[in-house]
Amino acid sequence: MDIESVRRFCHTLPATTEDIQWGDELLFRIGRKIFAMASLDAAASVRLSFKCTPEEFAELTERLGIIPAPYVARYHWVALEQWDALPAAELKRRIQESYELVRDKLPAKVRARILRRRVSGKRSIA
């Protein structure tokens, strides 16, 4: 996968928004909470970061090309040093799991608002 295919996939997840922060980080959010970050800087040492469970964190960081994510590893975020560190199907699954972990921690009011917008067919900006 590459940044464009990750971007397309993230936008298939309901209520996903994106913005650029910290100069060169493309952030994917649900309910204003980040679930994945991709570097726009070709020289950066990290391509993509996402959240995972503590068990997955331990397993993933033992794999070649995957490291604890700078600044957020204590929250069980991992970082891919190259786009092919995970096969495309697995990467999509991991991004979706990150999305679900973040979504499930949102306040009930925010989750309900996202669900209402999804049911009514409106695009959420939450």
Image (tube, rainbow, N blue to C red):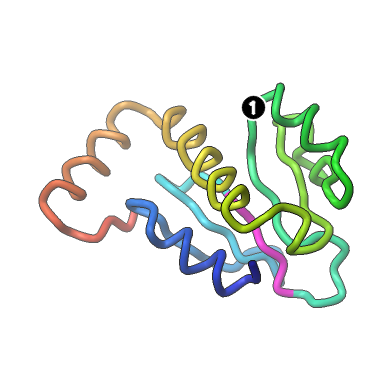
Rendering coords of residue 91 (x, y %)? 62, 51
Query: In this rendering, is residue 107 above or below 6?
Result: above
Name, please, the residue furthest toward the left: 120
User: On the image, which quarter does residue 43 sit in?
Assistant: bottom right
Question: Closer to the camera, 87 or 55?
Answer: 87
Q: How many marks?
A: 1
Q: Is residue 97 left or right of residue 66?
A: left
Query: Label 1, on which residue?
Result: 53
User: On the image, which quarter does residue 104 sit in?
Assistant: top left
Q: Amino acid at mark 1?
A: Thr
Q: Would you say residue 58 sits in the magenta stretch?
A: no
| Point 77% across, 49% down: residue | 79
Rendering coords of residue 58 (x, y %)? 80, 27
Rendering coords of residue 126 (x, y %)? 34, 51
Q: Would you say residue 38 sits in the magenta stretch?
A: yes
| Point 37% across, 28% down: residue | 107
Q: Quadrant of the N terminus?
A: bottom right
Magenta stretch prevailing secondary structure: strand
User: On the image, which quarter does residue 81 sit in?
Assistant: bottom right
| Point 58% across, 59% down: residue | 27
The secondary structure type at the circle numbered 1 is loop
Name, please, the residue furthest toward the top: 55
Crowd class of label 1 (few under 14; some 14 to 19; many from 20; radius 10 Å): some
Q: Which residues are magenta?
A: 36-40
Query: In this rendering, is residue 125 above or below 8?
Result: above
| Point 56% across, 48% down: residue | 95
Question: Closer to the camera, 11 or 18?
Answer: 11
